[in-house]
Amino acid sequence: MPIKKWIIQYSVALPLLFALFASVQYLKGSSLEESIEFGLLWSTLSLTVFALRRVYNFRKNINCSICNDLPDNEKS
């Protein structure tokens, strides 16, 4: 499994999703504390679901043209 690649991708995606979710909640009128809590919860949940699905696809050898994780799909 391309664990290193996934860790790098998720370490970039987590703060971006957190900032997006928290800022939208804050702009909708929630307090700063509620916005931060919402951002942490939903960014973690969405990345967890996405990561579990990628692991499932990888183990079942299901091709994903966007993810490009299968060994035969990697470009040399």
Image (cartoon, helix red, strand yellow):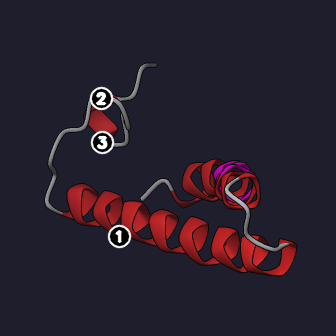
**Along the line of sight, which residue is nearer the eye, 47 or 55?**
47
- Percent across and percent down for residue 2 are 48, 53
- The kind of residue tagged 1 is Leu
Residue 62 belongs to the span the image colors magenta: no
Q: Residue at x 85, y 72 (%)?
A: 32
- Percent across and percent down for residue 53 are 29, 63
Secondary structure at badge 3 equals loop
Q: Which residue is mark 2?
A: 73
Q: Earlier in the sequence, mark 2 or mark 1?
A: 1
- The kind of residue tagged 3 is Leu
Can you say whether 35 is above or below 29 in the image? below
**Along the line of sight, which residue is nearer the eye, 46 or 26?**
26
| Pointers 2 and 3 in contact (C-beta within 8 Å) | yes
**Along the line of sight, which residue is nearer the eye, 2 or 7?**
7
Q: Residue at x 18, y 39 (%)?
A: 63
Q: Residue at x 71, y 80 (%)?
A: 37
The answer to whether 68 appears left or right of 58 in the picture is: right
Q: Which residue is mark 3?
A: 70
The answer to whether 75 appears left or right of 60 in the picture is: right
- Percent across and percent down for residue 35 are 74, 70
Q: Which residues are magenta?
A: 13-20
Q: Which residue is mark 1?
A: 52
Q: Which disc number belongs to residue 75?
A: none
Query: Which marked residue is nearer to the observer: mark 1 or mark 3?
Result: 1
Secondary structure at badge 2 equals helix
Q: Residue at x 42, y 64 (%)?
A: 51
Can you say whether 39 is above or below 7 in the image? below
Q: Quadrant of the N terminus?
A: bottom left
Q: CA distance from mark 2 to mark 3?
A: 5 Å
Q: Earlier in the sequence, mark 1 or mark 3?
A: 1
